[in-house]
Image (cartoon, rainbow, N blue to C red):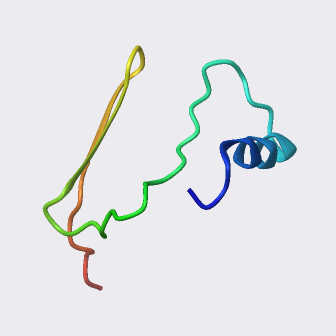
Amino acid sequence: MIFSLDAIIRFIAAVMTLEPGDVVATGTPAGVGPLGVGDVVDVVIEGIGRLRNPVVAAEQG
């Protein structure tokens, strides 16, 4: 990660209150390539649920 978890939490806490159970997305590890049309981003947080988003082409116009 570019920033440490401590630095990320300090930054967020400076502009908003973090509460127990808040989720902070920190990005991806090194070596991961870009997303493309047809890929699916699937995020699961145990005890909370799943967020599943397909990558689609941008609409023209």
Instruction: Give the vertical position of 61 relative to 8 (above or below).
Output: below
Of the 4 image quadrants, the one containing the N terminus is: bottom right
What residue is at 86 percent from the left and 45 percent from the top? 14
Count of all numbered marks drawn on residues in the image: 0
What residue is at 13 percent from the left and 62 percent from the top? 38
For residue 36, side relative to residue 28 (left or right): left
Q: Quadrant of residue 20?
A: top right
Instruction: Give the vertical position of 54 relative to 51 (above or below).
Output: below
What residue is at 74 percent from the left and 30 percent from the top? 18
Instruction: Return the residue nearer the eye: 22 or 58.
Output: 22
Of the 4 image quadrants, the one containing the C terminus is: bottom left
Provide residue 50's location: percent of width, then percent of height. Answer: 31, 29
Residue furthest toward the left?
Answer: 38
What residue is at 18 percent from the left and 58 percent from the top? 39
Instruction: Give the vertical position of 50 relative to 24 (above or below).
Output: above
Residue furthest toward the right?
Answer: 14
Instruction: Return the residue nearer the eye: 8 or 21.
Output: 8
Provide residue 49's location: percent of width, then percent of height. Answer: 35, 23
Residue furthest toward the top?
Answer: 47
Q: Quadrant of residue 28?
A: bottom left
Provide residue 34's location: percent of width, then percent of height. Answer: 31, 70
Provide residue 40's location: percent of width, then percent of height. Answer: 20, 51
